[in-house]
Amino acid sequence: MSPILVLVFIACYFSLLMIISRITSRKSKDHTYFDGDRQSHWFLVAFGMIGSGISAVSLVSIPGNVGNNHLYYFQFILGNIVGYLFIAFVLIPLFHKQQLVSIYTYLQTRFGNVTYKTGSLFFLVSQSFGAAFRLLLSVKILQTAFFDQLGIPYFITIIVVLVLIWLYTNKSGIKTIVWTDALQSFFLITVIVISIITIKNFLGFSFSGMVTAVAHHPYSKLFDWDPASGSNFFKQFISGVLITVALVGLDQSMMQKSLTVKNAKDARKNVLTFSFFIAFAQTLFLALGVLLYVFAEQKGISLEMKDGQFLNTDKLYPFLTQNYFGKIGAMAFFIGVVASTFATIDSCITALTTAFSYDFMDFANRPHEERKRIKNRVLLAVNIVIFTIVMAFWNSQGAIIFTIFKIAGYTYGPILGLYMTGLFTKILLKERGVPIACVAAALLTYGLNEYSISAWHYDIGFMNIAVNGLLTMIFLLALKKKQHG
Protein backbone atom coordinates (compact mmCIF):
# COMPACT_ATOMS: atom_id res chain seq x y z
CA MET A 1 0.00 0.00 0.00
CA SER A 2 1.30 3.44 -0.94
CA PRO A 3 2.93 5.31 1.98
CA ILE A 4 1.29 8.51 0.70
CA LEU A 5 -2.13 6.84 0.91
CA VAL A 6 -1.36 5.80 4.48
CA LEU A 7 -0.43 9.34 5.48
CA VAL A 8 -3.51 10.80 3.75
CA PHE A 9 -5.75 8.36 5.58
CA ILE A 10 -4.16 9.14 8.96
CA ALA A 11 -4.61 12.87 8.32
CA CYS A 12 -8.27 12.44 7.37
CA TYR A 13 -8.98 10.05 10.22
CA PHE A 14 -7.36 12.28 12.80
CA SER A 15 -9.15 15.35 11.41
CA LEU A 16 -12.45 13.55 11.94
CA LEU A 17 -11.52 12.76 15.55
CA MET A 18 -10.56 16.40 16.13
CA ILE A 19 -13.92 17.60 14.76
CA ILE A 20 -15.70 15.31 17.20
CA SER A 21 -13.43 16.52 19.99
CA ARG A 22 -14.18 20.16 19.21
CA ILE A 23 -17.94 19.57 19.21
CA THR A 24 -17.96 17.55 22.45
CA SER A 25 -15.59 19.94 24.22
CA ARG A 26 -18.02 22.83 24.24
CA LYS A 27 -19.02 24.00 27.73
CA SER A 28 -16.54 21.61 29.36
CA LYS A 29 -16.08 21.89 33.12
CA ASP A 30 -13.27 20.82 35.46
CA HIS A 31 -14.82 17.40 35.96
CA THR A 32 -15.96 16.79 32.35
CA TYR A 33 -12.70 15.04 31.47
CA PHE A 34 -13.44 12.45 34.17
CA ASP A 35 -17.24 11.97 34.23
CA GLY A 36 -18.50 13.32 30.88
CA ASP A 37 -21.08 15.40 32.81
CA ARG A 38 -22.96 12.09 33.27
CA GLN A 39 -25.02 12.74 30.14
CA SER A 40 -23.98 9.90 27.79
CA HIS A 41 -26.62 7.79 26.01
CA TRP A 42 -26.40 4.15 27.08
CA PHE A 43 -26.50 2.64 23.55
CA LEU A 44 -23.77 4.95 22.29
CA VAL A 45 -21.58 3.93 25.24
CA ALA A 46 -22.29 0.22 24.66
CA PHE A 47 -21.37 0.40 20.98
CA GLY A 48 -18.27 2.48 21.67
CA MET A 49 -17.03 0.02 24.28
CA ILE A 50 -16.50 -2.54 21.49
CA GLY A 51 -13.49 -0.53 20.37
CA SER A 52 -12.14 -0.38 23.91
CA GLY A 53 -12.74 -4.09 24.50
CA ILE A 54 -11.20 -5.17 21.20
CA SER A 55 -7.68 -3.84 20.89
CA ALA A 56 -5.19 -4.47 18.12
CA VAL A 57 -4.03 -7.28 20.41
CA SER A 58 -7.39 -9.01 20.01
CA LEU A 59 -7.44 -8.19 16.30
CA VAL A 60 -4.31 -10.24 15.61
CA SER A 61 -3.84 -12.51 18.65
CA ILE A 62 -7.26 -14.17 18.77
CA PRO A 63 -7.30 -15.19 15.07
CA GLY A 64 -3.59 -16.04 15.04
CA ASN A 65 -3.71 -18.29 18.09
CA VAL A 66 -6.41 -20.52 16.56
CA GLY A 67 -3.57 -22.55 15.02
CA ASN A 68 -2.28 -23.53 18.48
CA ASN A 69 -5.43 -23.45 20.60
CA HIS A 70 -8.22 -24.15 18.12
CA LEU A 71 -11.47 -22.37 19.09
CA TYR A 72 -10.95 -22.96 22.81
CA TYR A 73 -11.09 -19.21 23.37
CA PHE A 74 -14.86 -19.60 22.86
CA GLN A 75 -15.01 -21.26 26.28
CA PHE A 76 -13.58 -18.04 27.69
CA ILE A 77 -16.22 -16.01 25.81
CA LEU A 78 -19.00 -18.08 27.44
CA GLY A 79 -17.55 -17.23 30.84
CA ASN A 80 -17.40 -13.56 29.84
CA ILE A 81 -21.17 -13.50 29.37
CA VAL A 82 -21.76 -14.66 32.95
CA GLY A 83 -19.26 -12.07 34.16
CA TYR A 84 -21.18 -9.29 32.42
CA LEU A 85 -24.36 -10.38 34.19
CA PHE A 86 -22.59 -9.94 37.54
CA ILE A 87 -21.36 -6.50 36.49
CA ALA A 88 -24.80 -5.40 35.30
CA PHE A 89 -26.77 -6.54 38.34
CA VAL A 90 -24.25 -6.17 41.18
CA LEU A 91 -21.52 -3.64 40.40
CA ILE A 92 -23.40 -1.11 38.25
CA PRO A 93 -26.11 -0.38 40.88
CA LEU A 94 -23.41 -0.10 43.57
CA PHE A 95 -21.20 2.33 41.65
CA HIS A 96 -24.10 4.49 40.47
CA LYS A 97 -25.68 4.64 43.91
CA GLN A 98 -22.45 6.08 45.32
CA GLN A 99 -21.98 8.44 42.31
CA LEU A 100 -18.37 7.33 41.92
CA VAL A 101 -15.87 8.83 39.49
CA SER A 102 -12.98 6.55 40.45
CA ILE A 103 -14.52 3.16 41.20
CA TYR A 104 -11.81 2.45 43.78
CA THR A 105 -13.41 5.04 46.07
CA TYR A 106 -15.76 2.19 47.05
CA LEU A 107 -12.86 0.56 48.91
CA GLN A 108 -12.37 3.72 50.94
CA THR A 109 -16.03 3.78 51.93
CA ARG A 110 -16.07 0.07 52.75
CA PHE A 111 -12.67 -0.40 54.46
CA GLY A 112 -10.62 2.78 54.66
CA ASN A 113 -7.91 4.83 53.04
CA VAL A 114 -5.08 2.24 52.97
CA THR A 115 -7.24 -0.39 51.25
CA TYR A 116 -8.50 2.26 48.83
CA LYS A 117 -4.97 3.29 47.85
CA THR A 118 -3.87 -0.35 47.57
CA GLY A 119 -6.67 -1.27 45.17
CA SER A 120 -6.06 1.80 43.03
CA LEU A 121 -2.31 1.20 42.95
CA PHE A 122 -2.78 -2.38 41.71
CA PHE A 123 -5.03 -0.99 38.97
CA LEU A 124 -2.46 1.65 38.00
CA VAL A 125 0.27 -0.99 37.65
CA SER A 126 -2.03 -3.38 35.76
CA GLN A 127 -3.42 -0.79 33.39
CA SER A 128 -0.02 0.77 32.69
CA PHE A 129 1.38 -2.56 31.49
CA GLY A 130 -1.84 -3.55 29.75
CA ALA A 131 -2.02 -0.27 27.84
CA ALA A 132 1.66 -0.41 26.99
CA PHE A 133 1.47 -3.98 25.64
CA ARG A 134 -1.55 -3.10 23.52
CA LEU A 135 0.22 -0.06 22.14
CA LEU A 136 3.39 -2.09 21.59
CA LEU A 137 1.64 -4.63 19.36
CA SER A 138 -0.23 -1.91 17.47
CA VAL A 139 2.95 0.01 16.73
CA LYS A 140 4.79 -3.17 15.71
CA ILE A 141 2.05 -3.88 13.17
CA LEU A 142 2.07 -0.31 11.86
CA GLN A 143 5.87 -0.28 11.66
CA THR A 144 6.23 -3.58 9.82
CA ALA A 145 3.37 -2.95 7.45
CA PHE A 146 3.71 0.73 6.73
CA PHE A 147 6.08 3.07 8.56
CA ASP A 148 9.34 1.14 8.03
CA GLN A 149 8.81 1.86 4.33
CA LEU A 150 8.84 5.56 5.16
CA GLY A 151 12.02 5.28 7.23
CA ILE A 152 10.22 6.38 10.41
CA PRO A 153 11.81 4.93 13.60
CA TYR A 154 9.43 3.03 15.86
CA PHE A 155 9.96 5.31 18.84
CA ILE A 156 8.74 8.24 16.70
CA THR A 157 5.61 6.26 15.82
CA ILE A 158 4.95 5.61 19.52
CA ILE A 159 5.33 9.30 20.34
CA VAL A 160 3.11 10.36 17.43
CA VAL A 161 0.30 8.00 18.49
CA LEU A 162 0.42 9.24 22.09
CA VAL A 163 0.49 12.91 20.98
CA LEU A 164 -2.47 12.42 18.61
CA ILE A 165 -4.50 10.80 21.40
CA TRP A 166 -3.58 13.66 23.73
CA LEU A 167 -4.71 16.25 21.18
CA TYR A 168 -8.27 14.94 20.80
CA THR A 169 -8.85 13.86 24.41
CA ASN A 170 -7.01 16.33 26.66
CA LYS A 171 -9.88 18.81 27.06
CA SER A 172 -13.04 16.72 27.50
CA GLY A 173 -11.54 13.27 28.04
CA ILE A 174 -14.21 10.63 28.57
CA LYS A 175 -16.97 12.80 27.06
CA THR A 176 -15.07 12.91 23.77
CA ILE A 177 -14.01 9.27 23.98
CA VAL A 178 -17.61 8.04 24.22
CA TRP A 179 -18.21 9.49 20.74
CA THR A 180 -14.84 8.76 19.12
CA ASP A 181 -14.91 5.15 20.36
CA ALA A 182 -18.35 4.65 18.79
CA LEU A 183 -16.90 5.79 15.45
CA GLN A 184 -13.87 3.54 15.88
CA SER A 185 -16.05 0.57 16.85
CA PHE A 186 -17.95 1.00 13.59
CA PHE A 187 -14.69 0.94 11.63
CA LEU A 188 -13.48 -2.10 13.55
CA ILE A 189 -16.59 -4.22 12.94
CA THR A 190 -16.54 -3.20 9.28
CA VAL A 191 -12.92 -4.33 8.99
CA ILE A 192 -13.67 -7.78 10.43
CA VAL A 193 -16.48 -8.28 7.91
CA ILE A 194 -14.34 -7.02 5.00
CA SER A 195 -11.48 -9.37 5.96
CA ILE A 196 -13.80 -12.39 6.09
CA ILE A 197 -15.40 -11.50 2.74
CA THR A 198 -11.97 -10.91 1.18
CA ILE A 199 -10.74 -14.37 2.19
CA LYS A 200 -14.01 -15.95 1.04
CA ASN A 201 -13.65 -14.37 -2.39
CA PHE A 202 -9.95 -15.22 -2.76
CA LEU A 203 -10.68 -18.88 -1.98
CA GLY A 204 -13.73 -18.98 -4.24
CA PHE A 205 -16.13 -19.99 -1.46
CA SER A 206 -19.84 -19.39 -1.42
CA PHE A 207 -21.15 -18.21 1.95
CA SER A 208 -22.39 -21.71 2.81
CA GLY A 209 -19.12 -23.20 1.55
CA MET A 210 -17.16 -20.87 3.80
CA VAL A 211 -19.26 -21.83 6.83
CA THR A 212 -18.76 -25.53 6.02
CA ALA A 213 -15.00 -25.08 5.61
CA VAL A 214 -14.75 -23.38 9.00
CA ALA A 215 -17.05 -25.80 10.81
CA HIS A 216 -15.25 -28.93 9.55
CA HIS A 217 -11.67 -27.74 9.86
CA PRO A 218 -9.48 -29.61 12.40
CA TYR A 219 -8.90 -26.34 14.27
CA SER A 220 -12.65 -25.86 14.87
CA LYS A 221 -12.69 -27.63 18.21
CA LEU A 222 -14.73 -25.67 20.74
CA PHE A 223 -14.15 -27.53 23.98
CA ASP A 224 -11.08 -28.94 25.74
CA TRP A 225 -11.84 -31.45 28.50
CA ASP A 226 -8.22 -32.37 29.33
CA PRO A 227 -7.89 -31.47 33.06
CA ALA A 228 -4.12 -30.87 32.76
CA SER A 229 -4.47 -28.45 29.86
CA GLY A 230 -4.27 -24.71 30.35
CA SER A 231 -7.25 -24.39 27.99
CA ASN A 232 -9.47 -26.88 29.85
CA PHE A 233 -13.16 -25.91 29.65
CA PHE A 234 -13.67 -25.31 33.35
CA LYS A 235 -10.45 -23.28 33.67
CA GLN A 236 -11.38 -21.15 30.66
CA PHE A 237 -15.03 -20.70 31.63
CA ILE A 238 -14.42 -19.83 35.29
CA SER A 239 -11.48 -17.57 34.44
CA GLY A 240 -13.67 -15.96 31.74
CA VAL A 241 -16.17 -15.04 34.44
CA LEU A 242 -13.57 -13.74 36.87
CA ILE A 243 -11.39 -11.92 34.34
CA THR A 244 -14.47 -10.15 32.97
CA VAL A 245 -15.50 -9.07 36.46
CA ALA A 246 -11.94 -7.92 37.21
CA LEU A 247 -10.85 -6.47 33.84
CA VAL A 248 -14.20 -4.84 33.02
CA GLY A 249 -16.25 -4.47 36.20
CA LEU A 250 -13.30 -3.53 38.41
CA ASP A 251 -11.35 -1.70 35.70
CA GLN A 252 -11.58 2.08 35.68
CA SER A 253 -11.08 2.36 31.91
CA MET A 254 -14.14 0.22 31.12
CA MET A 255 -16.44 1.28 33.95
CA GLN A 256 -15.69 4.97 33.55
CA LYS A 257 -17.77 5.01 30.37
CA SER A 258 -20.70 3.29 32.08
CA LEU A 259 -20.53 5.85 34.88
CA THR A 260 -21.09 8.65 32.35
CA VAL A 261 -24.57 7.25 31.68
CA LYS A 262 -27.39 9.12 33.43
CA ASN A 263 -28.65 6.40 35.77
CA ALA A 264 -28.13 2.80 36.90
CA LYS A 265 -30.98 1.42 34.78
CA ASP A 266 -29.51 2.77 31.55
CA ALA A 267 -26.00 1.76 32.62
CA ARG A 268 -27.25 -1.82 33.12
CA LYS A 269 -28.73 -1.81 29.61
CA ASN A 270 -25.39 -0.51 28.36
CA VAL A 271 -23.42 -3.40 29.93
CA LEU A 272 -25.85 -6.10 28.78
CA THR A 273 -25.90 -4.75 25.22
CA PHE A 274 -22.13 -4.45 25.16
CA SER A 275 -21.80 -8.07 26.34
CA PHE A 276 -23.73 -9.19 23.24
CA PHE A 277 -21.68 -6.96 20.92
CA ILE A 278 -18.32 -8.09 22.27
CA ALA A 279 -19.20 -11.81 22.30
CA PHE A 280 -20.38 -11.59 18.69
CA ALA A 281 -17.24 -9.72 17.59
CA GLN A 282 -14.87 -12.14 19.34
CA THR A 283 -16.67 -15.11 17.78
CA LEU A 284 -16.14 -13.50 14.38
CA PHE A 285 -12.44 -13.22 15.24
CA LEU A 286 -12.29 -16.96 15.87
CA ALA A 287 -14.00 -17.72 12.56
CA LEU A 288 -11.56 -15.36 10.86
CA GLY A 289 -8.69 -17.25 12.52
CA VAL A 290 -9.78 -20.57 10.99
CA LEU A 291 -10.14 -18.89 7.59
CA LEU A 292 -6.61 -17.48 7.82
CA TYR A 293 -5.17 -20.96 8.31
CA VAL A 294 -7.42 -22.41 5.58
CA PHE A 295 -6.07 -19.71 3.25
CA ALA A 296 -2.46 -20.46 4.20
CA GLU A 297 -2.98 -24.19 3.63
CA GLN A 298 -4.67 -23.81 0.26
CA LYS A 299 -2.07 -21.33 -0.99
CA GLY A 300 0.81 -23.51 0.22
CA ILE A 301 2.16 -20.84 2.53
CA SER A 302 4.76 -22.24 4.92
CA LEU A 303 4.34 -21.06 8.53
CA GLU A 304 7.15 -21.23 11.06
CA MET A 305 6.71 -24.01 13.64
CA LYS A 306 8.57 -25.53 16.58
CA ASP A 307 7.63 -28.63 18.60
CA GLY A 308 4.27 -28.82 16.82
CA GLN A 309 3.33 -25.21 17.67
CA PHE A 310 3.12 -22.23 15.34
CA LEU A 311 5.54 -19.43 16.20
CA ASN A 312 4.79 -15.71 16.19
CA THR A 313 1.07 -16.23 15.57
CA ASP A 314 0.47 -12.50 16.05
CA LYS A 315 2.17 -11.95 12.70
CA LEU A 316 -0.09 -14.24 10.64
CA TYR A 317 -2.98 -11.84 9.99
CA PRO A 318 -0.74 -8.83 9.21
CA PHE A 319 1.48 -10.99 6.96
CA LEU A 320 -1.38 -12.38 4.87
CA THR A 321 -3.05 -9.00 4.67
CA GLN A 322 0.03 -7.26 3.33
CA ASN A 323 1.05 -9.95 0.87
CA TYR A 324 -2.09 -11.71 -0.35
CA PHE A 325 -5.33 -9.76 0.27
CA GLY A 326 -4.85 -6.90 -2.18
CA LYS A 327 -5.20 -3.16 -1.62
CA ILE A 328 -8.72 -3.33 -0.17
CA GLY A 329 -7.74 -6.00 2.34
CA ALA A 330 -4.57 -4.12 3.31
CA MET A 331 -6.40 -0.83 3.71
CA ALA A 332 -9.16 -2.44 5.76
CA PHE A 333 -6.60 -4.01 8.05
CA PHE A 334 -4.78 -0.71 8.47
CA ILE A 335 -8.04 1.03 9.38
CA GLY A 336 -8.78 -1.72 11.90
CA VAL A 337 -5.38 -1.38 13.59
CA VAL A 338 -5.60 2.41 13.78
CA ALA A 339 -9.19 2.36 15.07
CA SER A 340 -8.54 -0.32 17.68
CA THR A 341 -5.32 1.38 18.80
CA PHE A 342 -6.91 4.77 19.38
CA ALA A 343 -10.09 3.32 20.91
CA THR A 344 -8.18 1.21 23.42
CA ILE A 345 -5.29 3.46 24.36
CA ASP A 346 -7.32 6.66 24.73
CA SER A 347 -9.57 4.92 27.27
CA CYS A 348 -6.61 3.49 29.18
CA ILE A 349 -4.82 6.84 29.37
CA THR A 350 -7.99 8.62 30.54
CA ALA A 351 -8.64 5.95 33.17
CA LEU A 352 -5.07 6.08 34.49
CA THR A 353 -5.27 9.87 34.66
CA THR A 354 -8.62 9.70 36.45
CA ALA A 355 -7.54 7.07 39.00
CA PHE A 356 -4.31 8.84 39.92
CA SER A 357 -5.90 12.30 40.01
CA TYR A 358 -8.80 11.26 42.25
CA ASP A 359 -7.14 8.53 44.30
CA PHE A 360 -3.73 10.06 44.95
CA MET A 361 -4.00 13.79 44.15
CA ASP A 362 -7.34 14.46 45.90
CA PHE A 363 -8.63 16.12 42.73
CA ALA A 364 -12.23 16.45 43.91
CA ASN A 365 -11.23 18.60 46.87
CA ARG A 366 -8.72 20.83 45.09
CA PRO A 367 -9.44 24.50 44.32
CA HIS A 368 -10.67 25.26 40.82
CA GLU A 369 -7.41 26.92 39.74
CA GLU A 370 -5.37 23.82 40.64
CA ARG A 371 -7.49 21.20 38.91
CA LYS A 372 -6.43 21.79 35.32
CA ARG A 373 -2.75 21.89 36.30
CA ILE A 374 -3.04 18.61 38.23
CA LYS A 375 -4.86 16.86 35.38
CA ASN A 376 -2.31 17.99 32.78
CA ARG A 377 0.68 16.94 34.89
CA VAL A 378 -0.79 13.54 35.63
CA LEU A 379 -1.71 13.06 31.97
CA LEU A 380 1.86 13.85 30.91
CA ALA A 381 3.27 11.43 33.50
CA VAL A 382 0.94 8.65 32.32
CA ASN A 383 2.10 9.09 28.72
CA ILE A 384 5.76 8.98 29.78
CA VAL A 385 5.22 5.77 31.78
CA ILE A 386 3.46 4.04 28.87
CA PHE A 387 6.18 5.14 26.43
CA THR A 388 8.88 3.80 28.75
CA ILE A 389 7.21 0.39 29.13
CA VAL A 390 6.71 0.01 25.37
CA MET A 391 10.37 0.79 24.73
CA ALA A 392 11.48 -1.68 27.43
CA PHE A 393 9.44 -4.56 25.95
CA TRP A 394 9.89 -3.74 22.26
CA ASN A 395 11.73 -7.01 21.48
CA SER A 396 9.18 -9.31 23.15
CA GLN A 397 7.52 -12.02 21.04
CA GLY A 398 4.56 -14.41 21.23
CA ALA A 399 0.78 -14.03 21.49
CA ILE A 400 0.53 -10.82 23.50
CA ILE A 401 -3.13 -11.28 24.42
CA PHE A 402 -2.20 -14.27 26.57
CA THR A 403 0.66 -12.32 28.15
CA ILE A 404 -1.83 -9.60 29.09
CA PHE A 405 -4.26 -12.09 30.64
CA LYS A 406 -1.43 -13.85 32.47
CA ILE A 407 -0.19 -10.59 33.99
CA ALA A 408 -3.79 -9.63 34.79
CA GLY A 409 -4.13 -12.82 36.82
CA TYR A 410 -1.42 -11.56 39.16
CA THR A 411 -2.29 -7.85 39.24
CA TYR A 412 -6.10 -7.89 39.09
CA GLY A 413 -6.41 -10.90 41.42
CA PRO A 414 -5.88 -8.78 44.56
CA ILE A 415 -8.40 -6.20 43.30
CA LEU A 416 -10.90 -9.01 42.78
CA GLY A 417 -10.20 -10.32 46.29
CA LEU A 418 -10.65 -6.86 47.84
CA TYR A 419 -14.01 -6.29 46.18
CA MET A 420 -15.34 -9.78 46.85
CA THR A 421 -14.41 -9.38 50.51
CA GLY A 422 -16.14 -6.01 50.59
CA LEU A 423 -19.27 -7.19 48.81
CA PHE A 424 -19.82 -10.58 50.42
CA THR A 425 -18.59 -10.13 53.98
CA LYS A 426 -19.22 -7.55 56.69
CA ILE A 427 -15.73 -7.60 58.18
CA LEU A 428 -13.52 -4.61 58.85
CA LEU A 429 -9.77 -4.83 58.31
CA LYS A 430 -6.56 -4.00 60.11
CA GLU A 431 -5.58 -1.91 57.16
CA ARG A 432 -1.83 -1.69 57.70
CA GLY A 433 -1.52 -5.30 56.59
CA VAL A 434 -3.65 -4.98 53.43
CA PRO A 435 -0.83 -4.05 50.99
CA ILE A 436 1.31 -6.92 52.31
CA ALA A 437 -1.62 -9.36 51.98
CA CYS A 438 -2.25 -8.34 48.35
CA VAL A 439 1.40 -8.55 47.30
CA ALA A 440 1.85 -11.86 49.14
CA ALA A 441 -1.19 -13.36 47.40
CA ALA A 442 0.16 -12.41 43.97
CA LEU A 443 3.65 -13.78 44.71
CA LEU A 444 2.28 -17.00 46.18
CA THR A 445 0.04 -17.51 43.14
CA TYR A 446 3.04 -17.15 40.86
CA GLY A 447 5.03 -19.63 42.96
CA LEU A 448 2.19 -22.17 43.03
CA ASN A 449 1.77 -22.01 39.26
CA GLU A 450 5.50 -22.49 38.61
CA TYR A 451 5.65 -25.40 41.05
CA SER A 452 2.53 -26.98 39.55
CA ILE A 453 4.04 -26.87 36.07
CA SER A 454 7.44 -28.26 37.11
CA ALA A 455 6.16 -30.92 39.55
CA TRP A 456 2.93 -32.11 37.92
CA HIS A 457 3.04 -30.60 34.40
CA TYR A 458 -0.21 -28.90 35.34
CA ASP A 459 -0.68 -25.35 34.11
CA ILE A 460 -3.15 -23.36 36.19
CA GLY A 461 -3.53 -21.10 33.15
CA PHE A 462 -6.05 -18.27 33.26
CA MET A 463 -7.28 -19.67 36.60
CA ASN A 464 -4.41 -17.75 38.21
CA ILE A 465 -6.85 -14.93 38.82
CA ALA A 466 -9.17 -17.24 40.79
CA VAL A 467 -6.31 -18.60 42.91
CA ASN A 468 -4.96 -15.09 43.47
CA GLY A 469 -8.35 -13.65 44.39
CA LEU A 470 -9.06 -16.52 46.81
CA LEU A 471 -5.66 -16.20 48.49
CA THR A 472 -6.22 -12.46 48.84
CA MET A 473 -9.56 -13.08 50.55
CA ILE A 474 -7.99 -15.64 52.92
CA PHE A 475 -5.20 -13.21 53.86
CA LEU A 476 -7.73 -10.41 54.34
CA LEU A 477 -9.83 -12.61 56.65
CA ALA A 478 -6.69 -13.06 58.73
CA LEU A 479 -6.61 -9.27 59.06
CA LYS A 480 -10.17 -9.12 60.37
CA LYS A 481 -10.61 -6.42 62.96
CA LYS A 482 -12.51 -7.31 66.09
CA GLN A 483 -15.79 -5.46 66.23
CA HIS A 484 -17.19 -4.49 69.64
CA GLY A 485 -20.77 -4.05 70.57
Image (cartoon, rainbow, N blue to C red):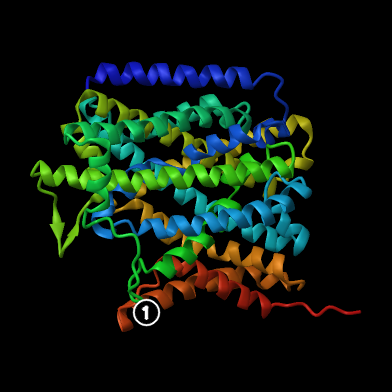
For this view, does 323 lie left or right of residue 372? left
In percent of width and height, residue 423 lies at: 71, 65
Q: To which quarter of the image does residue 308 belong?
A: bottom left
The single residue placed furthest to the bottom in the displayed view is: 455
Residue pointed to by mark 1 = 452
Q: Secondary structure at mark 1?
A: helix
In percent of width and height, residue 286 lies at: 33, 48
Q: To which quarter of the image does residue 194 belong?
A: top left
Q: How busy is the neighbourhood of tag 1: few (under 14 within 10 Å), some, or many (20 plus)?
A: some
> In this rendering, is residue 189 above or below 105?
above
The single residue placed furthest to the right in the displayed view is: 485
Asked if residue 382 shows in the view, the reply is: yes
Q: Residue at x 40, y 72 (%)?
A: 460
In percent of width and height, residue 324 lies at: 16, 33
Q: Residue at x 18, y 46 (%)?
A: 294
Q: In the image, what residue type sits under mark 1? A: Ser
Q: Residue at x 17, y 32 (%)?
A: 202
Depth check: give the residue in front, 288 or 313.
288
> In this rendering, is residue 84 above or below 180?
below
Asked if residue 394 shows in the view, the reply is: no
Quadrant (top left, top right, bottom left, bottom right) of the N terminus: top left
Quadrant (top left, top right, bottom left, bottom right) of the C terminus: bottom right
> In this rendering, is residue 147 above or below 128?
above
Depth check: give the residue in front, 2 or 200.
200
In percent of width and height, residue 303 lies at: 13, 49
Depth check: give the residue in front, 359 or 81.
81
The single residue placed furthest to the front in the displayed view is: 208
Depth check: give the residue in front, 29 or 20.
20
> In this rendering, is residue 157 above or below 289?
above
